[in-house]
Amino acid sequence: MTTFTTRPTLTGTFGMVSSTHWIASSAGMRMLELGGNAADGAVAAGFVLQVVEPHLNGPGGDLPLIVSSVDDPTPRVLCGQGPAPAGATPEHFTRAGLDRVPGSGPLATAVPGAVDAWLTLLRDRGTTSARQALEPALHYARHGHPVLARVSATISSVAELFTSDWHPSADQWLVDGAAPEPGSVVTNPAWADTLERLLAEEQAAVRGGATREGGIDAVLRAWRQGFVAEAVGAFAERAYRHSGGAVLPGVITAEDVASFEATWEDAVTAQWRGHTIAKTGPWGQGPALLQVLAMVDEASGGPASDVDLDTVEGVHTLVEAWKLAMADREAWLGDSADEGSEVHVPVAELLAADYLAQRASLISAQASRELRPGSPGGRTPRVAAQARQTEGAEVEPGDATAGEPTVQRDGATRGDTCHVDVVDRWGMLVSATPSGGWLQSSPFIPGLGFALGSRLQMMWLEQGLPSSLVPGRRPRTTLTPTMVLRDGIPVLACGTPGGDQQDQWQSVFLLRHLVGGLGLQEAVDAPNVHTTSFPGSFHPRASEPGVLVAESRLGAEVLDGLRARGHEVLDQGPWSLGRMCAVSRDPDTGVLGAAANPRGMQGYAVGR
């Protein structure tokens, strides 16, 4: 029986790349064609994403990724999530008259981590030079690319701010005072110049006898300790308007940039339905996905049970599990709690079978509207006071810089974060979710060609929480790539943009693909769903108790059945939720696969 899909699941034996922009996918495939491996391809695609999706990620942003290969199968996380600068203290924000971290502007900036992480991946797992991997990005920055309609719309939404206050951003992005026309060619000569200066350091090092790795280290030094760090620190001293209207300078310094290096870490893993699911540590939301998969099994009758997401029961169980996991995310996940403190919980306790069985027992036949964090080890959960006070809060009218840059709580798209997955013919898989440094997050740094990020908005000024604002600690990011192994060998890399929805949409994909038996593209195309019934990660950190956002293709009978169970269902039309990318490898045959999201008509997979 042939099932209709919006595009074929790609299959082959050479290499596959899936990303949220077709140019990035092609750039990654180019590296595979030149003999590079999956790490080389991911780096090339990642730097291109910074150029062609500047409203969704940039060099000043963040990057978590996971790598696994047949030769070295232990999944490893590379953390490119920069911490809070040394000067980002709660006292500084209080003195500035702020009761929370703004959603945009220099004060919301964490230390940039994306470029450091991409170059570290290239050095440690790749095979090519930085010049070879960054050549496509340099080409598009210098010579231009057809600008996406969504980029143009984003620029238009912040044009007044650019004109009135963020003047360097206006100089880069506005054409005669307006956003560039969709499809017109847009360049970024300042970023092209920065790339050339960085790559010149590699060339000089290699001429002096450095190895390939030594050449990349020279680029990293120029980024961390050279002209880039100095320009970031100098630019942050100037006051700019933030979300909410405050005009203030930032606190990030050259020393903050110099002190950060992307780190390799062990992945957090869980066994599920014959697979090992690998995620980032508790500085990301990844452990929540592992909780949900276990709770759904428990609530559905065990790991051999069917979970049908085309039924009221299946969707209800998944959504209720997510409410519980996101309550735990709010109470227990983060990077700010010291070991031994009351709010520090080892991840193993959050993933313990008896704890998750107890949590799953809370799922009833009716939708919950409560925020119900658990008590692992008998600890008393604590949630930020503002997390309970912002129900129904809205971004300031007309402020397009603040709030979630991915999907509004009513499901309406405002753009996406980015994602890229790569698999090569030798069995290496990479899953990466770059984001931050959006053109609308902070003023453009004209001498460098990029904006800083706004990830600190995910930290609370209230102290004593796992996600409190603490200098040197990482924001609890929503960025959450996934690696799946079977019998100890990587078989699937996947991920999606979507902020708080990222792991929710991935759970739908994994259940449909690994449990329901759908092919990659079928699982990507299938109707999606998520809940917003928990405190959001983005300014203004609002919660919508009981809200379930769904695609209409689930069917009127299912949606009405969910309403009957107490869910406030928001029908967002047939094709609105989910931005999944995925690549796979069959370890028995060596056959590779890839799929990409059709929603938004932008994501694309390539391969052969």
Image (cartoon, rainbow, N blue to C red):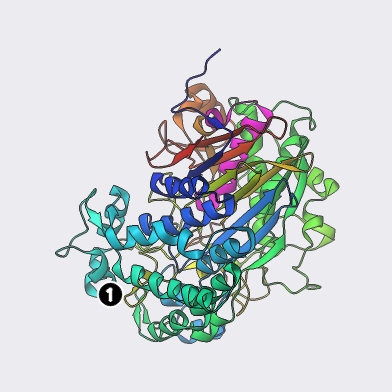
Q: Which residue is mark 1?
A: 168
Residue 384, percent from left and from top: 61, 67
Residue under the image location 54 percent in, 59 percent down: 128
Q: Which quadrant is the N terminus positioned in?
A: top right
The amino acid marked with disc number 1 is Pro
Whether residue 476 is visible to the viewer of this picture, yes or no, is no
Q: Is disc 1 placed on a helix, strand or loop?
A: helix
Determine the main secondary structure of the stretch shown in magenta: helix
- Spot the residue most to the left: 176
| Disc 1: CA contacts within 10 A as few (<14), some (14-19) or many (>=20) | some
- Give how far across and how far down residue 285 sits, in percent: 63, 56
Left or right: 385, with 587 as reference point:
left
In the image, 136 versus 517, the foreground residue is 136
Residue 322's place in the image compared with 469, above or below, is above
Picture quarter containing residue 175? bottom left
- In this figure, what is the number of numbered marks? 1
Q: Is residue 602 left or right of residue 536?
A: left
- On whether residue 425 falls in the magenta region, the answer is no
Q: Is residue 256 left or right of residue 178?
A: right
Q: Quadrant of residue 438?
A: bottom left
* Residue 360 makes an appearance in the image: yes
Vertical position of residue 430 compared to residue 105: above or below: above
Residue visible at 34% across and 68% down? 192
Q: Position of residue 46 (x, y in %)?
A: 48, 56
Q: In the image, which residues are magenta?
A: 497-523
Where 248 falls versus 81 (above or below)?
below
Q: At which x and y percent is residue 145?
A: 29, 53
